Amino acid sequence: MAAEPDPAELRRRVEAFLYREARLLDERRFSEWLALFAPEESYRIPADEEGDPGRVALVDDDRPTLEDRVARAESPLAHCQSPPSRTVHLVGNVEAEAEADGTVRAWAACVVYETRLGRTRALPARVAYRLEPGPGGGWRIREKTVWLLERDLALENLTFLL
């Protein structure tokens, strides 16, 4: 039987992983960000509080649709991102819990600041992850769900929100 991971060490490792994810997004290194995901992944931005699969969502990507999203974001033909957004993802209040199957449930608060066309806006969110062990002792994202606090308001161009 495997020893229970130290909760403080687990949280520290998960925090480091989430900070790296944020940096990759802010540096527009989308292909590297995509590599953080497991082959059988789920990335959702629900339109409601429940966030259940099968319900209406702003984003509901599996691996092929997430790959398409990244390809569009990296394309010079992405007019909705011309000029590209500059972002800062602030991640905090990280919690992590080991699951019996070796995965980790993690939760974080996040604020994404986006600057584009002379305007800056802030999008606060709660984020839930299910992480699985990855190569080299790291993590891979199996599930990521982002609950935007302002999801019930008119949300313009979210193409930068990967």
Image: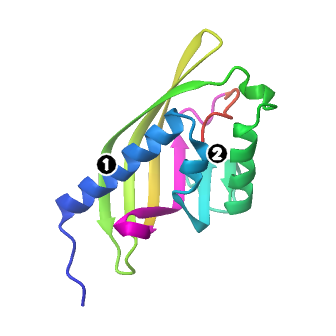
Q: Residue 75 lies in what quarter of the image?
A: top right
Q: Secondary structure at mark 1?
A: strand
User: Residue under circle 2?
Assistant: 47
Q: Residue furthest bottom?
A: 1
Q: Residue 8 lies in what quarter of the image?
A: bottom left
The foreground one among 142 and 105 is 142
- Where 80 sits versus 32, above or below? above
- Where 117 sits versus 77, above or below? above
- Ranked by sequence position, the earlier of labels 1 and 2 is 2
Residue type highlighted by circle 2: Ala
Which residue is drawn at the image coordinates 68% and 61% (left, top)? 63
Residue type highlighted by circle 1: Val
Which residue is drawn at the image coordinates 31% and 50% (left, top)? 15
Say whether residue 127 is magenta.
no
Return the mark for residue 27. Answer: none
Start-end of magenta stretch: 132-153
Which residue is drawn at the image coordinates 21% and 77% (left, top)? 4
Say whether residue 146 is magenta.
yes
The foreground one among 78 and 43 is 78
Rendering coords of residue 59 (x, y %): 68, 48
Residue 153 lies left or right of residue 1; in this view the side is: right
- Where 10 sits versus 109, above or below? below
Number of numbered discs visible in the structure rendering = 2
The foreground one among 26 and 90 is 26
Residue 16 lies left or right of residue 127; in this view the side is: left
Q: Secondary structure at mark 2?
A: loop
Rendering coords of residue 133 (x, y %): 41, 71
Rendering coords of residue 46 (x, y %): 62, 49
Q: Is residue 133 visible?
A: no
Q: Residue furthest top?
A: 118
Return the mark for residue 94. Answer: 1
